[in-house]
Image (cartoon, rainbow, N blue to C red):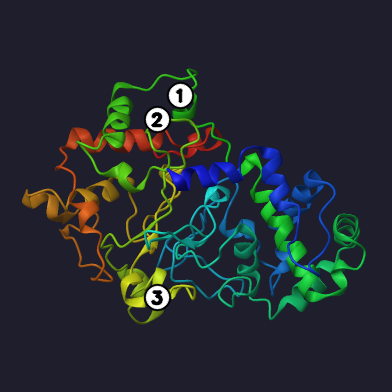
Amino acid sequence: MRLYRKIMAGLASAATAFALAATVAGPGHGAPAADPAALARLGEQLFHDTNLSRNRTQACATCHMPDLGLADGREVEGTGRAVSLGDDGTSIGTRNAPTAGYALLSPAFALTAAGAYVGGQFLDGRAATLEDQAAGPPLNPLEMAMPDKAAVVARLRENKDYVAAFGALFGKTVLDDAETGYAAMTGAIAAFERTPAFAPFDSKYDRFLRGEAVLTPEEELGRVLFFSSQFTNCSQCHRLKPVGGQEGETFSNYQFHNIGVPANPALDAAQGKPVADQGLAANDAVTDKAAAAGRFKVPTLRNVAVTGPYMHNGVFKDLRTVILFYNKYNAKAARRQIDPETGAPWAPPEVAGNISLKELESGPALDDKRINALVAFLKTLTDRRYEALIPAE
């Protein structure tokens, strides 16, 4: 409840969200933007600008496609949509690009009083805020691959419209310095990512809560199961608000867990070696690496039906497979111990330690009717503009 109140207090209104985005914090990092709407419009331009990558082929929108659930819909030879292709046309990452949708609602990365890490951006929380996240990809050699901040700011100065916009918002000298110019750029992108375009709350589920839509019997069963503490364990991690069924639910508590996801053989083959992603342990802010190994931030389930493949390494292609994977921890039937996508037993965890068995084993086994109902409910979490992308049965 405290985490929910903290998030809501910081995002109490659209005006507050814009205010958070409108200032590039810190001495020498630019003046507050006088026009939050103009800042967001500038951020939108930057979000789509491929000139901010070394070979001028990649933008934020390349891996977070606005028409495809703000995830990466590109196919990469050998790995499909599991990971993203870099600006050089050959480099690939080791993680599936999470949707940028609803990312504004993740709290800043922090260690709670109870000793658990929460929040941040990226799957390991290594970027505390949206601004920090926006600062990463342009300089990542596997992504946009710019050599340094000065090179990025030089690209900004090539565009006379940018020069005018940054000057009006942050002062005429903001692009004269690499640090202030880069900070102003990330502030603008973050401002765009805090607009309602990234968190419209207009899915069928949201419309149902407002009395504007009716769930099918199967979707309703899935809804009841999802929020039940008796029949499933879904909402233990995929619920922020203290009570299920409230408006504005993000479907993540932003904590970090290792759920025993197997390695992705296609990704290992493409990398030429096992990836064995350490997750939270790769975050420099985390000191106890052993306890953090294999843990990843609980993702939002909004738009989950249209942003596959799934898990941090894209190992599962189908949403129903994901439900079956969770179900294997409580099911005794032999057929439930088979991965439907491989026809073989579920592969062992990529990182075997720290598996959150308390949460995973807290629910009963599910029959096909209930599994199908959960899938049907998860599809109702799709934003209105993406509903046409929901895979047909």
Q: Residue furthest left?
A: 333
Measure the C-alpha gap from mark 2 to mark 3: 42 Å
Quarter holding residue 393: top left
- Residue marked by disc 1: 209
Left or right of residue 48, residue 168 in this image: right
* Labelled disc at residue 270: 3
Q: Residues within 10 Å of mark 2 (few under 14, many from 20)?
A: some
Residue type, numbered disc 3: Ala
Kindly state the secondary structure of the residue where label 3 is placed: helix
* Labelled disc at residue 136: none
Left or right of residue 106, residue 380 in this image: left
Seen at 63% across and 76% down, the residue is 145
- Residue marked by disc 2: 245
Measure the C-alpha gap from mark 3 to mark 1: 44 Å
Tell me if label 2 and label 3 are in contact, CB under 8 Å: no
Q: Residues within 10 Å of mark 3 (few under 14, many from 20)?
A: some
Mark 1 or mark 3, which is nearer the start of the sequence?
1
Residue 24 at what x, y percent from top left? 75, 61
| Of marks 2 and 3, the one in the foreground | 2
Tell me if label 1 and label 2 are in contact, CB under 8 Å: yes
Instruction: Tell me the quadrant of the picture where the N terminus can be found.
Output: top left
Kindly state the secondary structure of the residue where label 2 is placed: loop
